[in-house]
Amino acid sequence: MTNRTEIHRTRVRARSHFSLPRAGLVLMAAIAATQLQGCFVLGAAAVGGTALVATDRRTAGAQLEDQTIQVKAASQISDALRGNGNVSVNSYNQQVLITGQVPTEAYKKQIQQIVSNIANVKAVADEVVVGPNSTLGEEANDTYITSKVRASFIDDKQLYSQAFKITTSAGIVYLQGIVTQAEADQAAAVASSVSGVKKVVTLFNIITPQQLQAIYSHTS
């Protein structure tokens, strides 16, 4: 048995962190958007503590490392931007996704360098755009799309929804997780069928069914 995983890497944009006031505004806008469309589906947000460890296929150590990377990256990026731009960081299994907007190409290169230099980062997917910040309405729509994709995963009997991290940026859905090829294919197909989704891209660690069984054996 080998512990190696095959990393399927595509261009990824993902939004994970907002300051508290901005997050509140985005959440309220997302709720308003769902109510206007006649239904309310709010996907589960990040879960902390024991529940997160129990439902995540990453080890507890890997989850802690991802959180540490995100905190360090967010702090250093904030210091570098000094209020310019709107950049978010998302680490999964030490693969770091950065997204958002900055005013110049120099800022974009600086942010990529900051993240690359953080300890234990295995790979960086840089999708920061040089341009104006996204609006609250655009972010609310992305939040709503993410919730619909999550609900679709929960409804699909072939998928274990908690195995997937789902993020949306500009209508493009990004899927992360430690999954088998069959799970990866099914998840991409389900996400693609959700209304409002422009495109689905993935950043998966592909494992064999035997490796998946070993993960469950260790956590049971």
Image (cartoon, rainbow, N blue to C red):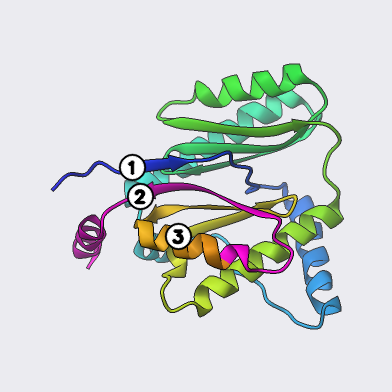
How far apart are labels 1 and 3 at the CA level? 15 Å
Residue 130 among those drawn in magenta: no
In the image, 131: left or right of 68?
Answer: right
Residue 167 locus on image (x, y percent): 61, 54
The residue depicted at 23 percent of the width and 55 percent of the height is 211
Residue drawn at x 36%, y 56% is 181
Q: Is 23 situated above or below 193? A: above
Residue holding disc 1: 6
The total of numbered circles placed on residues is: 3
The amino acid type of the residue labelled 3 equals Asp
Q: Which residues are magenta?
A: 191-220
Give the mark, 1 or 3, whose residue is nearer the N terminus. Answer: 1
Which residue is depicted at the point 83% across and 39% down? 133
Q: Residue 205 in magenta?
A: yes
Q: Are marks 1 and 2 in contact (CB under 8 Å)?
A: yes
Q: Which numbered disc flags the more N-terminal residue, 1 or 2?
A: 1
Q: Is residue 101 above or below residue 27?
A: above
| Residue of label 3 | 185
Rendered location of residue 10, percent (x, y): 53, 40
- Image coordinates of residue 220 in percent, x first then y, are 22, 68
Say which element carries label 2.
strand
> Tag 3: Cα neighbours inside 10 Å, few (<14), some, or many (≥20)?
few
Residue position for label 2: 206
